[in-house]
Amino acid sequence: MLSYILRRLAIAIPTLILVSMFIFTLQKILPGDPALALAGEERDAAALEFIREKYKLNDPIYEQYLAWAGGALKGDLGISLRTNQPVTELIGQKLPVTIQLAVMAIIIAFIIGIPMGVLSAVKKGTVFDYIANIVALSGLSIPNFWLGIMLILLVSVNLGWLPASGYVSPFIDPLRSLETMIMPAFVLGTALAATLMRHTRSAMLGVLRADYVRTARSKGLGETVVVIKHAFRNALLPIVTMTALLFGELLAGAVLTEQIFTIPGFGKLIVDAVFTRDYAVVQGVVLCTAVGYLLINLVADIVYFLLNPRMRSVL
Amino acid sequence: MTDVLDNEANDLLPARSGNRAWKKLKHNRSALLGLILVSFFIVAALAAPILPIADPAATSWSAIRKAPSAAHWLGTDEIGRDILSRMIWGARASLMAGVVSVIVATIIGVPLGLLSGYFGGWIDQVISRITDALLATPFLILAIALAAFLGPNLTNAMIAIGLSAMPKFVRLTRGQVLSVKTEDYVEGARAVGLADFSIISRYILPNVFAPVLVQATLTVATAIIAEASLSFLGLGQQPPDPSWGSMLNVAKNFLTQAPWMAWWPGAAIFLVVLGFNLLGDGLRDALDPREG
């Protein structure tokens, strides 16, 4: 087991180093002088030189990279140009908001996607299956920012049921928080539900063909028992690990969803940073995302490894 | 000897499987629906200059935010431009972004995947690690960062989307190469001393073609949404040139006064993306030899 984790880590680390180099050079190949951006209104040559010295912009690029990466390892991602806050602190403030949104979206996606996937596998080839597939494909094809706008139009503007924007922390007012987040979470959850439905369906189809399901049926067990106890339980493992891999999709979706519903989360942070040319924040956010993605993948692999009896026997 | 191998390969590959695939595709109703949707938008985009529609940039102060009517079928926008005309011209930006970025992704991704899978060793190591690194950053976030760094315009958005989609093609091609590399006919070609380049182009590339085509079709769908997302955020097509994403960006400010401004661009993105997804799914079923 340990050797497996170590082997996986051995692959993840060079990947992470490459990501960090990539993120760093991206900023360096930019047109424009970062010193000018930092100086703001100040155009005085001495002031520019002072800034270059202060931010070590005159050092060779590999030294700059090492300084940045070294800082990142210690949790120091630099200072935001716009708010003068440490980037780590900003990310720490915004990330919980996005995590709340993401968790709610995943719950909604599970509630919709999994039963639909199971049913359409069981009823393969029927009208239900056909409609479920069309619905899922539509869920994948609908741009989620448009879905968000349409929901605001219907639910907030026309019906006046839910607020169109804003954010309240669940620790301050859980009910208000739910009220402001349910619509964005639904928007973010739909694409996910569609993907989940398709994976659940194909995983279930695979399992329903397996010998042990045929055995269970031939024992005279009821169809519901066979489907839930024998088939679904075994199909669940690939579904759960698949969800981990949807993390990237979720985060990208959050960027647009937060933009539409003006939720002050991680996604809005990156968009605002991009527009204000707040490069330290852009770098920090992208780096954090990559670390999160690699970690979640690693955990998903390990969980899969641990839960899969066939893999365990390899040990 | 090489002739024998050649004939066999010609016999087995594109022509015959292409015909069979087309027959299967013709009988797949959802794929046909996809094809119709896609063709409709392509025709509209291509015909934009000759259609009897208003100038997409012509503003009119007497027709600001007018609801759909006989004069303006889809209504007008915040400065009195005809939305139908902007939708049709906007189709050009969306479709071009979808197709061009996928071309960028395939012409970089497929050769890298071929190199990586065929030669293995350190080449494979280097290419695979770079692919992993790119895949570790979510597609849209990578595209946003690239587009922001390159500067906001449609060309850069297409490059950014293409580069972000590229690693998928490297992975797919590499996997495909690995699975055919050990086939007898490839081993045979190598045994008779055929050059690597010939082996790749004659025996390996045709096997990579089908899955890449499927992936490309589905990626056009993703790329169209990505372009719309970038334009929506202001990182793609710049005003006054029309694009569905930037139209939505403006429309969201007039939801109470002119909701129709938001209806059409989103519906168009949805339909064209649905079309490419249906077509891609259909192609996958048609080209998959395992499906009966």
Image (cartoon, rainbow, N blue to C red):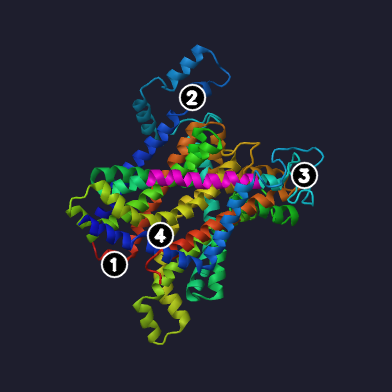
Give the number of the mark in front: 3 or 1.
3
Image spot of residue B133 (x, y percent): 37, 43
In this picture, is A228 found above or below B40?
below
The CA span between labels 3 and 1 is: 64 Å
Residue at mark 4 to residue at mark 2: CA–CA distance: 42 Å
Residue A308 appears at what percent x and percent y? 33, 65
Residue A34: numbered disc = 2
Q: Is residue B256 left or right of residue B118?
A: right
Magenta segment boundaries in residue numbering: B88-109
First in sequence: mark 4 vs mark 2: 2
Q: Which mark is residue B198?
A: none
- Specify whether B287 is left or right of A4: right
The picture places residue B162, in percent across and down from the top left corner, at 46, 43
User: How crowded is the residue under tag 4: few (<14 C-alpha within 10 Å), some, or many (20+)?
Assistant: some
Q: Nearer the viewer, mark 4 or mark 3?
A: 3
Single out the mark in the foreground, 2 or 1.
Answer: 2
- Marks 4 and 2 on same chain: yes
Could you say which disc has been placed on residue A241 in the image? 4
At label 3, counting other C-alpha atoms closer than 10 Å, the crowd grade (few under 14, some 14-19, many 20 or more) is many
Name the residue located 72 percent from the left edge and 48 percent from the top edge.
B255
Which amino acid lies under the numbered mark 1 shown in the image of this protein?
Arg
Label 3 sits on residue: B65
B190 relative to B154, above or below: below
How far apart are the two marked residues, 2 and 3, measured between alpha carbons? 42 Å
Which of the 4 image quadrants contains residue A315?
bottom left
Q: Based on the displayed image, in which of its 4 quarters is residue B232 positioned?
A: top right
Same subunit, labels 3 and 1: the answer reads no
Q: In the rendered image, which residue does mark 1 sit on?
A: A310
Q: Secondary structure at mark 4?
A: helix
